[in-house]
Amino acid sequence: MQINFNVSEMPLEGLAKLRHVAGWAVRKELERCRRFIRENMFSQTTETRQKVYAAYAKCELLEEQIIVQFAWLKDNTSAPGTLEVTEDRQYRDRGLLHISDEAFECFKILENLRVQQMNLSRLMGSNEKASFADNAVHAIQSDATLSSAWKAAFKDIEPDKEVSTSVVNL
């Protein structure tokens, strides 16, 4: 029996945790990119230097478009209750990130797709259990709604910058 579950209808506590985890994922990607840049910034290999430039551009985009200061966000968000979990878990160094409403909307769509594609009843009903996860990831990556929501999160992007539509490979 398949249970229909809409992420947008989750209780406030669930949405707050989703926003918190999305901010955590953005933070981890920033750390990964910065580490790659530090380790490879003096490389003489053309291919590696291009990857360093791409990682730097990704860091810039995430910092300028996705990460938002809490002080601004608490006055301007459309979902104020979702900010509490991240803010309550802050340490002295304020290491947890707050994300924009547009990015949060994108992560809600991503979570909804994940729930739809990777649930137990679909797995049990699948004839190709070995490739079940790969098929689910492919379906999520090729979803047009997710792609357009991800692009919408970068609404103020400069014309010379390019945004990859693959939020799954954030």
Image: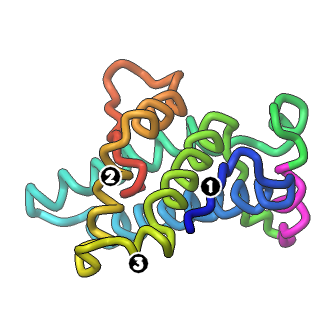
Using the numbered discs, state the Cα–Cα distance from disc 3 to disc 1 in whole angstroms: 16 Å
Q: Residue at x 28, y 56 (%)?
A: 138
User: Can you identify the residue that label 1 sits on?
Assistant: 4
Label 3 amino acid? Met
Judged from this view, the residue extending furthest toward the bottom is 130
Using the numbered discs, state the Cα–Cα distance from disc 2 to disc 3 in whole angstroms: 18 Å
Q: Earlier in the sequence, mark 3 or mark 1?
A: 1
Which secondary structure, mark 2? helix
**152 and 129: which is toward the camera:** 129
Which is more foreground, mark 2 or mark 3?
3
Q: Is residue 95 left or right of residue 146?
A: right
User: Can you identify the residue that label 2 sits on?
Assistant: 139
Give the quadrant of the C terminus.
bottom left
Q: Residue at x 37, y 41 (%)?
A: 143
Q: Is residue 57 left or right of residue 10?
A: left
The local crowd at label 2, few if under 14, some if 14 to 19, many if 20 or more residues have their Cα within 10 Å, is some
Label 1 amino acid? Asn
Q: Earlier in the sequence, mark 2 or mark 1?
A: 1
Label 2 amino acid? Ala
Task: Specify start and end residues of the magenta stretch as a single range.
Answer: 82-92
**68 and 168: which is toward the camera:** 168
Which secondary structure, mark 1? loop
Q: Is residue 9 above or below residue 43?
A: above
